Image: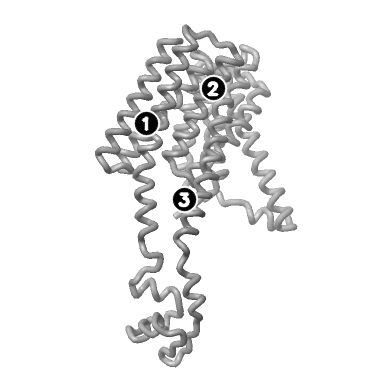
Amino acid sequence: MVNPNPFVLQTYKSAICFITCWIVLLLGAEFEFTTWGIVSGFLWVTGGVGGIYGIRNAGLAISVGTWSSVTVLISFAWGIFFFDEEVQSIAGTSIGVVFLLLGFVGMAYFSSAGEDYRDEEALTEPLLESSDEEACTLRDNEACTSDEGLMNLVQTETNVVKGSLIEFEVEEQQTIIANPKEKVGLEYEKKLLGLLGAVLDGVLGGSNLIPMKLAPTIYQGLDYTISFAIGAAIATLTGWILYFLVSSCKEESFAAGYQALPSLHLRKIWMQGTVSGTLWSIGNVSQILSVTLLGESIGMSIIQSQMIISGLLGIVLFKEIKDMKTIIFWVASAVVTFTGIVFLSHKF
């Protein structure tokens, strides 16, 4: 099973974003580049790495719910308080945002219910399997050639099996069995760090199109797609250079630093990376148009309803939630989110 570095996954997204951005020229956009795109690129790449790190450590449901909620708050603050975007009613728009947040929190909570249940099952499972085959992997394989040898391996501290002396200490056996409380503590710390990564993604994700709003009008809208993609490519390349320099300093050698770089796993995940990057690129174009036409506060907030789609895929396709009661509560939260979207659409 491949376990790629978060920056590797972000690299796939950035690469596909750069490759596909030129398609907007066929849609009537003109090639216009602004350095504000580089700022957007750095914000997006940094946040993207944080988001992937969050998913890997805190879980998909919690991470998506966290960064979606934070993104709504950040983009709403940018639009209303910094850009003075005109809406029919600030109070009404605020109510719509509250509906979105409540829906996001509900979907994240009920999506993670199944995940927490699986974690509890994992903690209750024996840490050492009782099967003969897996017990054999703890010691010399010769000790497992007979049932008598296996019993001696488990019950005594010094065993002689087929003339081979196998010695081990009781203290060594005890270290094999991890303390469940310590395991829970490590899992908690891991999820906390993942949650911080998701928050970082939400803050930067809610701000990555602010540079477009600051750029001259000629660079805004669909034309900004190319500037954004070039900026993402520059940011990703810069990240790899920094990664290489840090690794080289640690290894005290450029050659060793290069070898220490995370693998791209091209043979194993190139297709998944390409599909994910392509889907994101299509969504990015829609995101740029949404913010351009609806504004930062409403456009970016509505975009976060993507959580409804990811949740439905998790329930229908991946069977992540099996309890019908939990599914009903998740659907109710999705309805609340959709209500917020409708509310915002009437306040624009």
What label does residue 268 carry, if any?
3
Q: Secondary structure at mark 2?
A: helix
* Marks 3, 1: nearer the viewer: 1
Is residue 299 depicted above or below 132 in this figure? above
Q: Secondary structure at mark 1?
A: helix
* Marks 1, 2: nearer the viewer: 2
Rendered location of residue 339, percent (x, y): 36, 20
Q: Closest to the observer: 315 or 72?
A: 72
Whether residues under marks 3 and 1 lie with C-beta atoms below 8 angstroms apart, the answer is: no
121 left or right of 266?
left
Dot 3 surroundings within 10 Å: few (below 14), some, or many (20 or more)?
A: few
Q: Closest to the observer: 111 or 242?
A: 111
Dot 1 surroundings within 10 Å: few (below 14), some, or many (20 or more)?
A: few
Whether residues under marks 2 and 3 lie with C-beta atoms below 8 angstroms apart, the answer is: no
3D distance between C-alphas at marks 2 and 3: 37 Å
Is residue 181 depicted above or below 17 in this figure? below
At horizontal 50% and vertical 46% (from top left) the residue drawn is: 191
At horizontal 51% and vertical 18% (from top left) the residue drawn is: 297
Kind of residue at badge 3: Lys
Q: How many marks?
A: 3
Residue indicated by mark 2? 75
State which tag comes first along the sequence, 1 or 2: 2
Kind of residue at badge 2: Ser
Q: Secondary structure at mark 3?
A: helix
Residue indicated by mark 1? 309
At horizontal 61% and vertical 34% (from top left) the residue drawn is: 233
